[in-house]
Amino acid sequence: MFNLSEKRRFIRFEIPLTVMFREAGTNENYCQAVASNFSREGLCLVAQDFPFDAAAVIDVKMDVPDKNISLDISGEVMWRSNHDGRWEVGLRFCEVDRTGKMDVLDYAYSSWLAGIRSKAR
């Protein structure tokens, strides 16, 4: 679920959750994507269409599993890459509710731990 050989400041947990995104500060309709991983500083989105360039700021809505809350995130596009018609986008958090972020990280950690335990059986 995470790669210890990477030289990142924080572990990225694989967490395939459906999210919605749009340009920050607009009333445009949200587009759908999947958050493929999540860390303390950012996340990676996978989307069919991603019309924003690096350095753009986007708003993301994410429902926190096992909770009755939706997490609102503002993030800066750090990189984007198109692979076979599918966009992978790295976001660095600009604004995110600390409690909500911890709820997602707790969920991701619990999922990772369950996967480790099931492999050990």
Image (cartoon, rainbow, N blue to C red):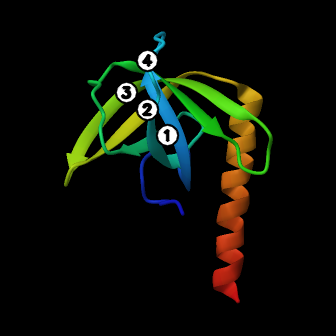
Q: Amino acid at mark 4?
A: Glu
How far across and down, in percent of the image, does residue 73 sit?
58, 26
Judge left or right: residue 36 versus residue 17.
left
Q: Is residue 120 above or below residue 82?
A: below
Q: Who's the residue at 26% across and 24% down the image?
A: 53
Measure the C-alpha gap from mark 1 to mark 4: 22 Å
Per the image, the residue denoted by label 1 is: 43
Looking at the rendered image, the disc whose residue lies closer to the viewer, 4 or 2, is 4
Q: Earlier in the sequence, mark 4 or mark 3?
A: 4
Q: Who's the residue at 66% across and 54% down the image?
A: 108
Looking at the rendered image, the disc whose residue lies closer to the viewer, 1 or 4, is 4
Q: Which mark is residue 77?
A: 3
Q: Amino acid at mark 3?
A: Val
Q: Is residue 26 above or below residue 19?
A: above
Name the quadrant containing residue 87. Answer: top left
Q: Earlier in the sequence, mark 4 or mark 2?
A: 4
How far across and down, in percent of the image, does residue 18 sit?
54, 47
Q: Which mark is residue 28?
A: 4
How far across and down, in percent of the image, does residue 63 sit?
66, 40
Looking at the rendered image, the disc whose residue lies closer to the viewer, 4 or 3, is 4
Counting labels gives 4
Is disc 1 placed on a helix, strand or loop? Answer: strand
Measure the C-alpha gap from mark 4 to mark 2: 19 Å
Q: Which mark is residue 91?
A: 2
Q: Amino acid at mark 1?
A: Leu
Q: Is residue 111 above or below residue 88?
A: below
Is disc 4 placed on a helix, strand or loop? Answer: loop
